[in-house]
Amino acid sequence: VANFLLTGLRSVEVGVPDLAASERFYREIWGLAAVARAGEAVYLRASGDAHHVLALYPRAKTELLSVTFSAAARGDVDAVAARVASCGGRVEASPGPVDEPGGGYGLTLRDPDGRRFRVVAGDARHGDGAPRPDFPERLAHVVLNATDVEAASRFMCDALGFRITDRTRMMNFIRTSSDHHSIAFARGHAATLHHIAFQVPSLESVMRGAGRLKDAGFPIEWGVGRHGPGHNVFAYFIAPDGLPIEYTAEVESVGDNYKVGAPEDWTWPPGRVDAWGISPPPSARLHEAQTRIVFA
Ligand SMILES: [Fe+2]
């Protein structure tokens, strides 16, 4: 696989109105573990090597603070910084030491629509990473709504080195590694959060995770099913703080010779919303949750 400027998605930082309730949910039900605290913020890890995959900050309402990508070296952080302005974005914090648990050398930027992204190299990694059956290993992808999906995708490609993997009627899927996508942009009315997907080890893990959520009073809002683009298995839920979240597994790995799909390549037979043809459509609650959360 050709070199990408960034190596993948590391973490998502969110503000939540009831931090204790959110922390309890992500630890006891979703399957993350607290790895650090700083001030009032809590940093949660999955079973993989990323220092944390989710950071919770106390805020008046649930909001997206940033989406953080990993880079292999400091020079790659600097390379992104050098490209941002000419691509229509804005550097919010120039490359330098990251003052939070996990540390590293990082950059904070805003894309032309005001989405806040961070790029971090040299952050702490866990050496004890081992998949736990049925629990998250790492982030798989973040999907963001965009009024202009092509322009949002272009910024990610030009400034952060992503490539387009597939286009559908609803979304552009873009990648920064062999993962089919780390980010997707969905056609929407504002630059809001669509959902955050956590990778679990297997299809069995998606099923058992969904059962655990159901037992805890969190019904499946969409799924279980298998997506078209990316071919991943999915189950969607709404966290107590309103975040739309997904368990996913078996995401397709793609190489340089992947033929970029167009909307006409990705159609379902009438009545279908997943490749197996077993999933009911997404709930009205999920649709609503997927429009509500803005970038701070
Ligand atoms: Fe997803």
Image (cartoon, helix red, strand yellow):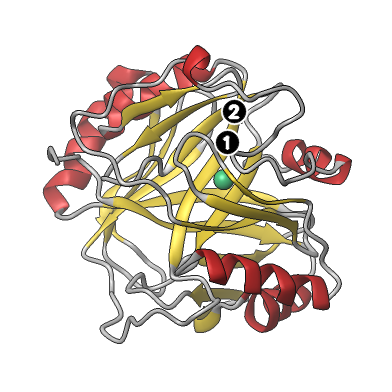
Image position of 61 with respect to 122: above or below: above
Residue at position x 51%, y 71% in the image: 136
- Give the residue type that dot 2 points to: Ala
- The foreground one among 56 and 108 is 56
The residue at the point 64 percent across, 72 percent down is 209
- Within the displayed image, which quadrant is ligand 1 positioned in? top right
Q: Percent position (x, y) of residue 192?
A: 65, 35
Q: Is residue 214 left or right of residue 88?
A: right
Pointer 2 residue: 186
**Is residue 228 in view from this perspective?**
yes
Tell me if residue 57 comes above or below residue 169 in the rendering: below
Who's the residue at 79% across and 38% down the image? 287
Q: Name the residue furthest bottom.
A: 128
The Cα atoms of the two marked residues, 2 and 1, are separated by: 6 Å
Near-viewer residue (93 or 201): 201
Sequence-first disc among 2 and 1: 1
- Residue 174 x/y as whole percent: 39, 32
- Quadrant containing the N terminus in the rendered view: top left
The residue identified by callout 1 is 144
The local crowd at label 1, few if under 14, some if 14 to 19, many if 20 or more residues have their Cα within 10 Å, is: many
Do the residues under discs 2 and 1 have CB atoms within 8 angstroms?
yes
